[in-house]
Image: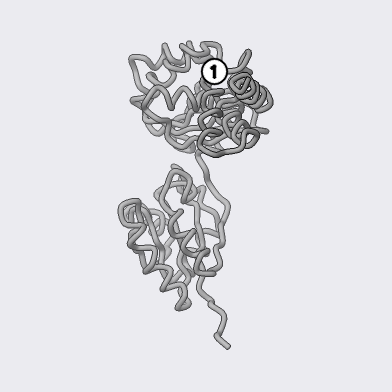
């Protein structure tokens, strides 16, 4: 009988700005790991030196994660403990790490996730907007069509944005819904942390000519319910059905993406099908 594998992956969130936010459990995990896989070895070394942690570092970033993952999985299958960190915050959340976590699970390895700093969670709480239902969108898309689709989310939206694109993105939102509540959270946990709250129109005007400084998280209030059935959403359901999907699940998926009502979309598509048959 083969001996059980003792190696494992430990996912370690790191401070998003203030080095004092690192947890005792993360520091212990970094000390005990045989290898620390990090997005940027130079950034991680600053944290380790601050707390006197000696560790063997190996680079693991978006450009090498598919090549590096088999090496790390093999090491863990041989009994090594690998700690995974990104430059800031929780790995995998708009950061590298998914390939390694998925590969570790596929290999039957234990994956332990430690709690810790997250810019998305900090911004959501600081925004003052409802946090019972919310969606994380990563970095907002640059093209208007996909951006409008995300801004139609029927729950509070949390997204990362480049400082130089804040004005443009809020400008699109202001055209769609000028009264939508927004919080622009910048430099969270750092010396110049600031949370600027207001409606889309006011904040779009504020940042139209002067970009905020530092790293930015946008928190946007839920889109209001749409009146009637969106023709584009009905067409999307119809095309899914023509491609072989069942009408009810297709309507549910499109409703979740557009903020429409699944029952309305289903009725519109099935009514149209009956009319065409007649």
Measured as percent of width and height from the top left, residue 92 is found at: 47, 49
Residue 117 drawn above or below residue 109: above
Q: Specify the quadrant of the image occupied by residue 247.
A: top right
Q: Does any portion of residue 217 appear in the rendered image?
A: yes
Above or below, 79 relative to 18: below
The outermost residue toward the bottom is: 1
Direction from residue 108 to residue 172 in the image, left or right: left
The image quarter in which residue 113 lies: bottom right
Q: How many marks?
A: 1
10 Å crowding of disc 1: few (<14), some (14-19), many (20+): few
Residue depicted at x 37% and y 69%: 71
Q: Position of residue 143 (x, y in %)?
A: 37, 25
Q: Residue at x 50, y 15 (%)?
A: 200
* Residue situated furthest front in the rendering: 278
At 46% across and 51% down in the image, what residue appears?
91
Asked whether, in this view, residue 5 is left or right of residue 40, the answer is: right
Image: 133 above or below 204: below
Give the x, y percent position of residue 136.
53, 36
Where does the N terminus fall, quadrant-wise?
bottom right
Q: Could you tell me if residue 125 is visible in this image?
A: no
Q: Nearer the viewer, residue 5 or 42?
A: 5
Q: In the picture, which quadrant includes the C terminus?
A: top right
Could you say where residue 160 lies in the image, as x and y percent from the top left? Answer: 44, 33
SS of the residue under disc 1: helix
Q: Which residue position is annotated with label 1?
A: 231
In the image, taking residue 140 as reference, residue 199 lies left or right, namely right
Check the image and report above or below for 160 versus 276: below
């Amino acid at each position: 009988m083969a001996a059980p594998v003792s190696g494992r992956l430990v996912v370690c969130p790191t401070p998003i700005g203030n080095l004092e936010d690192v947890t005792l459990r993360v520091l212990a995990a970094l000390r005990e790991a045989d290898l620390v896989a990090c997005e940027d070895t130079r950034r991680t070394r600053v944290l380790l030196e601050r707390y006197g942690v000696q560790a063997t570092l190996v680079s693991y970033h978006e450009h090498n994660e598919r090549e590096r993952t088999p090496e790390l999985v093999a090491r863990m299958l041989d009994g090594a403990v690998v700690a995974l960190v990104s430059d800031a915050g929780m790995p995998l959340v708009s950061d590298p790490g998914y390939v390694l976590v998925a590969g570790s699970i596929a290999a039957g390895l234990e994956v332990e996730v430690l709690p810790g700093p997250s810019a998305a969670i900090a911004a959501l709480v600081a925004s003052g907007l409802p946090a019972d239902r919310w969606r994380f969108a990563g970095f907002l898309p640059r093209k208007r069509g996909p951006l409008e689709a995300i801004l139609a989310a029927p729950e509070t939206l949390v997204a990362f944005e480049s400082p130089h694109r804040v004005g443009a993105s809020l400008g699109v939102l202001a055209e769609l819904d000028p009264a939508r509540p927004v919080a622009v959270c910048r430099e969270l946990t750092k010396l110049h942390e600031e949370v600027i709250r207001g409606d889309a129109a006011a904040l779009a005007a504020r940042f139209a000519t002067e970009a905020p400084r530092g790293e930015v998280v946008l928190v946007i209030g839920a889109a209001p319910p749409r009146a009637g059935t969106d023709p584009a959403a009905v067409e999307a359901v119809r095309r899914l059905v023509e491609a072989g999907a069942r009408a009810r699940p297709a309507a549910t998926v499109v409703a979740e993406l557009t903020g429409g009502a699944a029952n309305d979309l289903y009725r519109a598509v099935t009514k149209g099908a009956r009319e065409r048959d007649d």
